[in-house]
Amino acid sequence: MTGETAPNRAALPTLTRDGRLVVVARARRAEDYERVLDVLVDAGVRSVEVTLTTPGTFDRLPALIERYRGAADIGVGTVTALDQLERVIDAGAPYAVTPITSATLVERAVAAGLPIVPGGLTPTELFASWSLGASAVKVFPAGQVAPGYVKDLRGPFPGIAVVPSGGVDLDGARAWLAAGAVAVSVGGPLLGDAFADGDLAALRERTARFVAACAEGSGS
């Protein structure tokens, strides 16, 4: 199997795919999500990954999905165990993200029709997930490689869909997308101190720059 024709590969959700920008919202507590996500979505972000390292994320998830329905995909990240993935599936989240390479998680997501983006760094890790039917693979931590890594991967794996994550700043977002990444996953360089009661006007300005950069050359 080359991975190009993996059975039942779910496509990334339309908003995530078209926006080409996933904002990783790693809040201190789930009660802080809406204050920041309202600004992100209003400024044009179409995909937000809320993380299970934030206490209370599962309790808040149904309300977040409903609040931003039609405007932004609210995916769930830092999924590392099967019971967590089952809760993501039950909640009806549009996608899941895991920082690890796990056949168990990918196979379960594929069986449920849930788009999943598993993490890895080496070609062996990334292809293992891709060949099982992952919707895309997360190059993590992306700061350890260069955007040209996309071309390197596509030599042996022509159709692999790559999403870099970890330390991707504004210039990095442009470079990775120009190199062929299907989207970029961005956290701190965009969010800054937003979850520490930071300036939301400044957040809006940063968000607008990232959204514009990710729209460049997308045909939108």
Image (cartoon, helix red, strand yellow):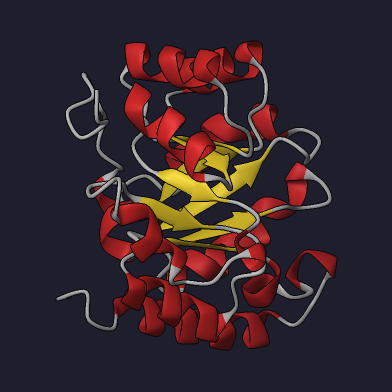
Against 3, is 141 above or below?
below
Quarter holding the C terminus is bottom left
Q: How many marks?
A: 0
Residue 205 at x, y = what percent?
56, 88
Figure check: 184 above or below 56: below
Q: Tell me the residue at 66%/64% (across/down).
A: 144
Q: Between residues 215 and 120, which one lies in front from this camera angle?
A: 120
Answer yes or no: is residue 74 visible.
Answer: yes
- Say left or right for 42 vs 144: left
Q: Can residue 46 be seen in this view?
A: no
Q: Which residue is drawn at 69% across and 35% down?
A: 57
Along the line of sight, the residue nearer the viewer: 72 or 22: 22
Position of residue 77 relative to residue 47, above or below, is above
Q: Is residue 26 left or right of 111 when viewed as pictured? A: right
Instruction: Give residue 217's position: percent from left, percent from top.
Output: 22, 81
Outermost front residue: 156
Report whether 157 appears left or right of 205.
left
Q: Quadrant of residue 21?
A: bottom left
Compare residues 186 and 46 and report the one nearer the observer: 186
Toward which corner of the image does residue 120 lie, by quadrant? top right
Choose between 175 and 39: the one closer to the eye. Answer: 175
Residue shown at 67% from the left, 76% from the top: 189
- Residue 192 position within the rendered picture, expressed as x and y whole percent measured from the top left: 74, 75
Q: Where is residue 76 in the image (x, y as percent from the top left)?
A: 56, 37
Above or below, comparing residue 87 to residue 63 in the picture: above
Locate the N terminus by quadrant.
Answer: top left
